[in-house]
Image (cartoon, grey):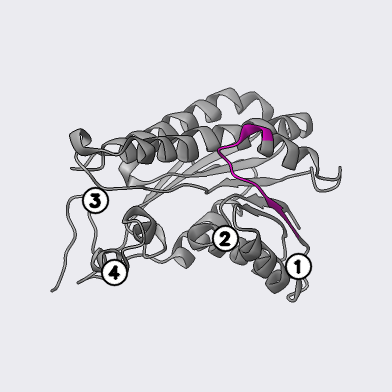
């Protein structure tokens, strides 16, 4: 059955790969993000594959912009079957006493408040139809805390808690809620965390094979293809070389 899927943070990394994977399955896409030029390019790519696709350009940190964007959808496009809350980032890698408060605000506003704003705008549409699936992209950083991870880990622990709360609150409405919590994956993540330092970002993945955005996209789509009576509540996934945030088997 063709579904309508809204993906936040679809301009790169997990979000872009997730949108592409749902498109391969023939679903309709609402792609969102801040970088309109990238959204236009991805939309053109998907339409060329005979996939129905529209884009909404907004910053998840801006609640008014989120509400305006969702309200701009036609009734047909408001029948959202799957919401993928993917937009998120890590900014900086400092001990807490050396932390940059601008980085803290950016992570909390995007990873926590942004997820809440988008969910608040979409959930009533699902509740009205007694149907839907929300997938929150968390992290292994939401399961444990590592040195210099402080606020990023806190934001992903919040995603973990919010997902559990959603699952309880939406139980009576027949809405599925899933968290996918990836370990290290080679995307723009480290490039953003290290403020564009390409060499430092590349070194983060030296000596082992990390996951890819396509790996997470595969699992995201898979979670939506289970029988109607089944729901993956929490899926933690790493590459074979990674046991957790602390232990990675680097060969060089």
Question: Helix or strand or loop: what does disc 4 sit on?
Answer: helix
Question: In the picture provided, is 93 more to the left or to the right than 77?
Answer: left
Disc nearer the start of the sequence (1/3): 1
Residue sitting at 73 percent across and 75 percent down?
49
**Disc 4 crowd, CA 10 A, few/some/many (<14, 14-19, 20+):** some
Q: Furthest-left residue in view?
A: 252
Disc nearer the start of the sequence (4/1): 1
Disc nearer the start of the sequence (2/3): 2
Residue 152, x across and y down, in percent: 33, 40
Q: Which disc number belongs to residue 51?
A: 1
Q: Which disc number belongs to residue 11?
A: 2
The magenta stretch is: 54-64
Q: Which disc number belongs to residue 244?
A: 3
- Whole-angstrom CA distance, mark 2 to mark 3, is 27 Å
Residue 183, x across and y down, in percent: 33, 54
Q: Which residue is mark 4?
A: 202
Q: Is residue 132 magenta?
A: no
Disc nearer the start of the sequence (4/3): 4
């Amino acid at each position: 059955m063709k579904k309508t899927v809204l993906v936040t943070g679809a301009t790169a990394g997990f979000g872009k790969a997730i949108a592409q994977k749902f498109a391969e399955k023939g679903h309709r896409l609402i792609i969102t993000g801040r970088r309109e030029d990238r959204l236009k390019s991805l939309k053109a790519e998907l339409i060329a594959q005979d996939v129905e696709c529209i884009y909404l350009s907004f910053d998840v940190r801006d609640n008014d912009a989120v509400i305006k964007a969702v309200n701009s959808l036609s009734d047909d496009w408001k029948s959202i079957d799957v919401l993928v809350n993917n937009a998120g980032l890590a900014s900086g890698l400092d001990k807490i006493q050396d932390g940059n408060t601008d980085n803290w605000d950016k992570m909390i506003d995007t990873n926590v408040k942004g997820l809440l704003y988008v969910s608040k705008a979409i959930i009533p549409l699902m509740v009205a139809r007694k149907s839907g699936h929300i997938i929150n992209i968390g992290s292994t950083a939401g399961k444990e805390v590592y040195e210099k991870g402080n606020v990023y880990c806190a934001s992903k622990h919040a995603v973990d808690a919010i997902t559990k709360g959603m699952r309880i609150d939406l139980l009576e409405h027949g809405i599925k809620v899933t968290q996918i919590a990836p370990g290290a994956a080679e995307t723009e993540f480290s490039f953003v965390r290290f403020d564009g330092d390409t060499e430092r970002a590349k070194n983060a993945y030296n000596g082992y094979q990390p996951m890819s955005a396509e790996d997470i996209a595969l699992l995201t789509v898979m979670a939506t293809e289970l029988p109607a009576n089944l729901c993956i509540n929490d899926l933690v996934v790493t590459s074979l070389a990674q046991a957790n945030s602390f232990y990675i088997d680097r060969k060089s």
